[in-house]
Structure formats: C-alpha cells, structure tokens
Amino acid sequence: MLQRIAHIRIKKRLTLFAALSVAMIAVALSNLPAVSAGQPGGNKHSGQFIFRFDTFGDEALWTDTLRLHEIIQSSVSPRTALSVGLKVDATALPPNFLTKNNLDDPATTVELIRRNAVVGLVGKVEDGRLTSLGTTCAICHSTVNNSVAPGIGERLDGWPNLDLNPGAIIALSPALTEAQKAAYNSWGPGRYDPRFNIDGINRPVVIPPAYGLRDVPFETFTGDGKISYWNNYVAVTQMGGHGSFSDPRLGINIVQTPDLVAPKLPALLAYQLSLPVPPPPADVVNPTAAQRGQALFEGPARCGTCHISPTYTDVQNGPNADTPLLHEPAATGMEPVYAQRSATQKYRTTPLRGLWQHPPYFHDGSAATLLDVVNHYDAHFALGLSPAEKFDLVEFLKSL
C-alpha cells in the first residue's frame, strides 16, 4: 500500500525559476483574468474534467497513509514545488497572485492548491489548512506552455511531464522506511516505475505521452492491454484510487466498492483520443532532409516494417485487431528486465508520435537523442547507414 504512489521529489537545488525576478512574473501575470477560487468548473462527467480533476478517491493513499498534506503544509513552497517539476495553471490565478504572495512560504502552495492551480493535485483547504490531498492523471500527463514563467502557463494536456521528479516527495512521508525512501529517490525526473509496488523490482520507465492515441489501442510499452486497461491499472494500483482491477497474468485481484474508476473510463478514453499530436515548430525540422529520411525509413532502413504509417506502430488489423504484435527483447536489442515483469514479457512497437517533444527515448530512457535511437538500430540490424543517412532519418522522425 505504501508503495502505491505517483511521484515528486524535493531537491536541495532550485531550478531556474528561483532566479527569475518577481518583476518579470508581475508583468506576465498582470493581464490574466480573475477566476473563482472554488472547485473547477465544467462537466464532472466529461473526460477532460476526469483527466484534470478526478482523484478516484485516492486521498486514502496520499492523505490517510502517506500524510503528504502535512508535508506540503509545512515544507513545500511554490519555489520548491516548481523545482521538482510541478506545474502551475496560470489561468486559475487572479492578476498578480504570485507577486502578492510569498513564493518561499508553503502557505502560498496551499492557496495554489485551493485554487486548483497546481496541475495534477486536488486538495481540500479549511481555514488555511490543507486537510486532504489527491492526485489526478494530469500530474504525469500534462505540463504547461511556460507562457508566464518556467513551470507556469496554460495547460498542455497529454504532454508527458518530464520535469516531474518521480518518487521523492513521497520519500518525505513519515510513513516510509529509509529503504523505501532510497528506492523512490532513485527514480529521477521524468521516470516512474508502475510495477515496483507489484513485484518489488526497482526499474523505472520514462513517462509516455497521452496524446495521439487514436487508433493506437495498446498504450503500454509491453502491450498488456488497451488504453482503458492501463488507465484502470494506474488509477487503482498506482494512484491508489478506490476501484477494482484484476489481471490473473499479474496475480492482481483488487476489488473495492463502490468503484470510483470503472464508470469514468469511457469518458476518460474519449478525451485522451481527442488529444492531437503536437506538430514540431517550423525551425525544428529540415523538410528536405526529412523527405529523404522518409524514403530511407520506408525502404533500406526497414523501419517501416514495424512502424507502419499512419500510427507508426504494428498493431494488427482485421480479425486479429485485439492482439498486438509483440517482440522478444532480443529481437530489437532492448533490455529484457522490464518486459519480464509484464503480463506479456515482450515489447510492442512504440507508436512514433511527437518525437521532437519528448526525449529521452525507449521505455527506459536509454537513448538520450533520436540519433542515439538510429545508432542503436543501425548497430543491432547491421544497416550500415552513413552519417548523412542517419541525419536524414532523424529529421524524418522529428517530423512525425
């Protein structure tokens, strides 16, 4: 139970935000409209609301067990929260909010939570005290556009929050042992282990994007199930939501009533499927090189054998559409440990979507750049690509 967590980490060193002048933030915030400090508006049965604000009752973990509301109340200032990758929704703030409040005071963080301005956190505040805290899908799968300052801006739903430092705010919980804290502290920014609390093996993976999922039914790295399967798994086994999840392949059978998760999965899926892949900025891709790279991708480099357009994954069609094509780790040169911990013990072909936006690559983040990806497959399949061909392939991958 104590290991069912999403992730955040307190660092001793502050990020660039700590060096920003309050005056700069004041100018940027001066034109933001005032909004209600109450609960977020919108249809509570809509997928967007569920994605952004529904905790599925996971306060039982974050509040009752881990007591993180106490840690935030006493120790987490806005500067600290931003330094570990938490994001602030500027549209939820009235003009000059951050210039009128002490950014080194945890009480300001509590007020941000009261205003539903901390992306992915939902809390109850009574007389200035944070009395409960829960997490939502958005904590890992949303970021902001930094239109006000680093970490502060308008929401970008579906974008992986690769600044979020998995595990270690949890390591501040008084309910954890030193060994548990060490494991969570080891994860680092942008990584999370969704199986650690199941098998006790500490091998975090990169937080994936949640956009561009239409026609990509198997979201997990290992093709365990369709998108709603994974949403259910995460909500119940990782977020600590009050619902049921069963998979005999993993030896998991959790039954909790009432189920606060399953009835919301269809709307959540519909919203996720509506999130488009962000196109690369104009100055990111060399279009001429990308055209040459596409010809290589679909021809001599043989990438298109598995990464089939338009989703650039190898999901089967026709009568076998419910069965993903999976690969033994050795077939593509991937490390085998994470696959062995899954229900399938294999890897599915990752759909190539918005690659310009979310390095590092591969499930474990072992490829820091797209060139590293190309080099890996060039060596593994003995493709014999020239430096110019590798450059062209990278440009094409950035264009997807």
Image (spheres, helix red, strand yellow):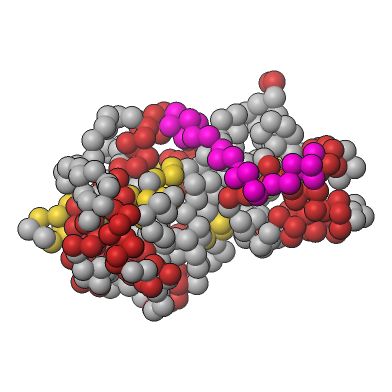
Most extreme residue toward the left is 127
- Identify the residue shown where x is 13% and y is 61%: 129
380 in relation to 222, above or below: below
Which of 73 and 295 lies nearest the eye of the viewer?
295
| Number of marks in picture | 0
**Looking at the rendering, in which quadrant would you find the N terminus?**
bottom left
Q: Position of residue 150 (x, y in %)?
A: 41, 60
The part of the chain drawn in magenta is 270-291
Q: Position of residue 102 (x, y in %)?
A: 21, 68
Report whether 41 appears left or right of 179: left
- Tell me which corner region of the image, top left, top right, bottom left or bottom right, holds residue 78: bottom left
Which of 374 and 95 lies nearest the eye of the viewer?
95
- Identify the residue shown where x is 38% and y is 46%: 154
- Tell me which corner region of the image, top left, top right, bottom left or bottom right, holds residue 378: bottom right
Report whether 302 appears left or right of 67: right
Q: Position of residue 254 (x, y in %)?
A: 39, 45
State whether residue 53 appears in this view.
yes
State whether residue 269 appears in this view.
no
Residue 275 falls within the magenta-colored stretch:
yes
Report whether 129 appears left or right of 289: left
- Identify the residue shown where x is 68% and y is 42%: 399
153 in relation to 175, above or below: above
Residue 27 falls within the magenta-colored stretch:
no
- Identify the residue shown where x is 49% and y is 34%: 275
